[in-house]
Structure formats: structure tokens, C-alpha cells
Image: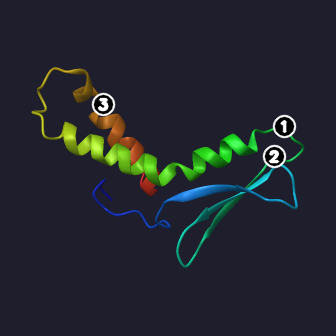
Amino acid sequence: MDTETKARHTSGPWFPVEYAECKGTWHIDATGNNPFIADVCSGNGEYPSEANARIIAAAPDLLAAVEAILQRIDLEPKEAVFPCSAMREDLRAAIRKARGSQ
């Protein structure tokens, strides 16, 4: 699968919502017909569940941003000497990972 193949994930935006009945547990919710994405728990309070929930909730936005950056970089010749040209493969790897095609 290349980076152009669409991911099969619930479309964003996603939102972290603290679960009122269980302190330290966060839901990742989306809008639409299937709002539940995941739960993030701190267990015994050792893990930063709110921060983890926020980074997970940001995933669709981060993927879209990386794809937009890569589209812009790809307009430049591959031989171009500017800092972003070296990021092409890193961006493609991040997109493949997000899409589950490492």
C-alpha cells in the first residue's frame, strides 16, 4: 500500500473526553454515526492518560498535516537542496505507519 491509499479509520475530528465515572480514564470520541474510538486509562495513575488521549485524538489532524506537507514538498525537484527535501522519506514512513502499511 502506498501513501496515496486512504486509511480505513474513523474520520476526524476526534476529541478527548474525560470519563466522569472513572477519574483518569479518557474516551476518544468522533462526530458522526460511530463516535467511540478508544479508551485511555492511567491504570494506577502512573501514566499520563490525558496527554496520551490528546495525542491519539490529534492523529487524524496530524496525518492530514503530514500528507499536505508531503504534497507541497513533492512539487519541488527531488534534487532540490533545502531542508524539507530530506524529510520526504520520513514523512512517507509516518504516513505508512498511520495507515498500517509499515
- Residue at image x 50%, y 67%? 10
Relative image position of residue 84 (x, y in whole percent)? 26, 27
Query: How far apart are the alpha carbons under marks 2 and 3?
Result: 34 Å
- In the picture, measured across the screen, residue 9 lies left or right of residue 43, that is left
Please tell me which residue lies in front, 39 or 50: 50
Q: Is residue 60 above or below residue 71?
A: below
Relative image position of residue 40 (x, y in whole percent)? 73, 53
Q: Which residue occupies the extreme bottom position in the image?
A: 33
* Element at label 3: helix
Callout in the foreground (2, 3): 2
Residue type, label 3: Met
**Residue under pointer 2:** 42
Q: Is the residue under label 1 in contact with that under label 2 (CB below 8 Å)?
A: yes
- Residue at image x 17%, y 40%? 74
Query: How far apart are the alpha carbons under marks 2 and 1?
Result: 6 Å
- In the picture, measured across the screen, residue 12 lies left or right of residue 53, that is left
Quarter holding residue 25? bottom right
**Residue under pointer 1:** 46
Q: Which mark is residue 87?
A: 3
Residue type, label 2: Ser
* Element at label 2: loop
Q: Is the residue under label 1 in contact with that under label 3 (CB below 8 Å)?
A: no
Residue type, label 1: Glu
Relative image position of residue 38 (x, y in whole percent)? 67, 61
